[in-house]
Amino acid sequence: MTTYAYEVVERIPKVLSLGIVYHNVDFDVAALVCPCGCGHRISLLVPDGHRIAVRGNVPSIVPSILVADAPCHSHFYITDGEVDWYPPMSASQAAAVMHRQVARHVSNDRASRSWWEGTRRWVLRTRGRVARWFGGDQ
């Protein structure tokens, strides 16, 4: 049974150790190794997707963590450093969850852009399309 400790880091390490939630507070990202033993690296967006509460160096993470991009399809919570397992989701359920998450991120990204930034991006995209239409290199 894997238990997790919490560690604040300046950079998420390339090689992660099982049983540690690495958290870069400046960039609001966290990473850990899947507790099932498959070795899959899990990356979390904090606070956009997940919230980490810490008591001492013991983490709790909500909502649940679904490993949809690995064969194990693990699904669990981390509560007071302990892994609480939930049944794995089917491939179609996992795909639906991932689709909703991506749509939420895209929506949040668009909403956070200023009017000027949105207009600038539109002009650059349109310019590129027009240039390609007329055989340019853009």
Image: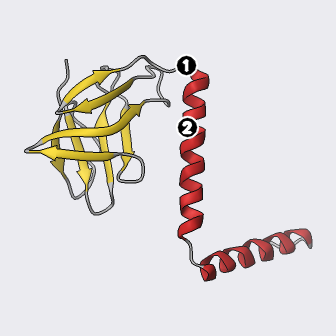
State the image quarter where residue 28 is shown.
bottom left
Q: Is residue 24 left or right of residue 106?
A: left
Q: Nearer the viewer, residue 106 or 132?
A: 106
Identify the residue at horizontal 37%, vertical 29% (top origin).
40
Per the image, the residue denoted by label 1 is: 90
The amino acid sitting under disc 2 is Met
Left or right? Give the position of 87 relative to 23: right
Q: Characterize the local packing of mark 1: few (<14), some (14-19) or many (20 or more) Cα atoms within 10 angstroms.
A: few
Look at mark 2 in the image and give the residue it sits on: 98
Secondary structure of residue under mark 2: helix
Q: Amino acid at mark 1?
A: Ser
Residue 83 lies in quadrant: top left
Which residue is found at the position 40% from the left and 23% from the top?
Answer: 74
Whole-percent x, y for residue 10 in the image: 22, 58
Would residue 132 be found to the left or right of residue 57 on screen? right
Q: Nearer the viewer, residue 1 or 85?
A: 85
Q: Residue furthest bottom?
A: 116
